Image (tube, rainbow, N blue to C red):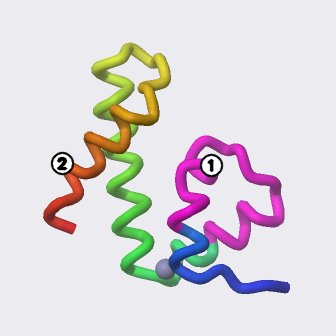
Amino acid sequence: MTDIDCNALLERLWAYLDGEVEETEYRHLRAHIAHCLGCKHHADFEVRLRQIIQAKCRGERAPARLREELRRLLGNSL
Ligand SMILES: [Zn+2]
C-alpha cells in the first residue's frame, strides 16, 4: 500500500473530483485529504472553483485554460 504525498494528490485532484480515478486510488486520495489540512483547503477550493465555473458555463466543462486562469486568480491568497 502506497501513501500519497501532497504533490501526488494535487496532481490527481481534478481527476479525483471528477470521479475519474479508480476505487483504490480514490480511497487513498480521500484518506489523504481527510488528514492533511493543506490538501483539504486545496480540495475545498477546487470544489468552490468548479461551482463557480459550472454556474457560469451552465454545467458545461470549462476549457482547461480558463480553469487554470481562474485558479491562478483565485488562488493568489492560498
Ligand atoms: Zn497533503
First in residue order: circle 2 vs circle 1: 1
Which residue does the numbered mark 1 point to in the structure image? Answer: 15
Residue sitting at 14 percent across and 64 percent down? 77
Q: CA distance from mark 2 to mark 1?
A: 21 Å
- Residue 20 placement, left or right of 38: right
- Quadrant (top left, top right, bottom left, bottom right) of the C terminus: bottom left
Give coordinates of residue 7: x percent, y percent. 53, 75
- In this rendering, which labeled residue sits more in front, label 2 or label 1? 2
Residue sitting at 38 percent across and 35 percent down? 65
Three-letter residue code for mark 1: Ala
Residue 14 in the image: above or below residue 7: above
Give coordinates of residue 62: x percent, y percent. 42, 26
Which residue does the numbered mark 2 point to in the structure image? Answer: 73
Q: Which residues are magenta?
A: 10-30
Q: Ligand 1 within 8 A of label 1's CB?
A: no
| SS category of the residue bearing label 2 | helix
Q: Within 10 Å of the Cα at label 2, are there few (<14), some (14-19), or many (20+) other Cα atoms?
A: few
